[in-house]
Image: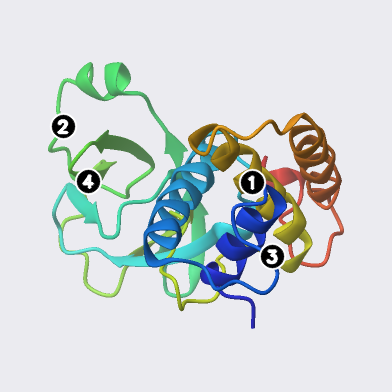
Amino acid sequence: MTTNSDICTAALRKIGVVSASQPIQAEDLRDALAALGRMLAAWQNHRYNLWTYAEATIPLTGAASYIMDPAPVEVHDVRFRRNGLDMPMQQITREEYNALPQKASIGIPSSYFVNRQATGTTLTVWPVLASGVGESLEVTYTRAIVTPLAGDAMDFPAQFEDAVVYGLAARLADDYEVAADRIIMRAEAELDLALSFDREGSVYFAGDEYR
């Protein structure tokens, strides 16, 4: 099992901060873990994260809005489920939801609005189901990459390991004022190679319907 500590140690060795026979210092590990977390979060902005697609079931209670906890990076698809049957719902914008004259209309939910805030994400449906007994929302979403802790397993596929190591090394080179043109070029090449797995029919990545 490759841990986040292993990734940080390998990255620091690429830029010569840690030698092959030298253990990583606590301060260097702390800084590298923080940089790793920032890099993986930035990658999610570019949607280099199809391995984090997930499914959630939200029981309907008759309310209009439901808090998603933990907050997703992005909501891709929502279905209304009743008696084991899924009915696709249409995503609407904030402006479209605000323009609805009767937001408390009762009926079968057919639309949803995702309200993303710094403090959390709320999923609002329209129309509102009267009781919600036994019905649910089935949500496909992108979860946030787990904050990297030293002893935890890396939260990315093995095919991305070299891309992460070299990408982290390139980031850390600035902090340690190390000339790293070769590392930067290798980081770009490894990321391109890793992203080649992002295709339909891959072992674990989603298909084109989730792009």
Q: Mark 1 is on which residue type?
A: Ala
Q: Mark 3 is on which residue type?
A: Pro
- Mark 2 or mark 3, which has the lower sequence index? 2
Cα separation, mark 1 vs mark 2, equals 51 Å
Q: Mark 4 is on which residue type?
A: Gly
Which quadrant would the N terminus be assigned to in this image?
bottom right
Which quadrant would the C terminus be assigned to in this image?
top right
Q: Disc 2 designates what residue?
A: 103
| Helix, strand or loop under label 3 | loop
Cα separation, mark 3 vs mark 1, equals 18 Å
Residue 207 percent coordinates (x, y): 76, 51
- Mark 4 or mark 3, which has the lower sequence index? 4
Residue 68 percent coordinates (x, y): 27, 55
Q: Is residue 211 left or right of residue 92?
A: right
Q: Residues within 10 Å of mark 1 (few under 14, many from 20)?
A: many
Q: Which mark is residue 157?
A: 3
| Helix, strand or loop under label 4 | strand
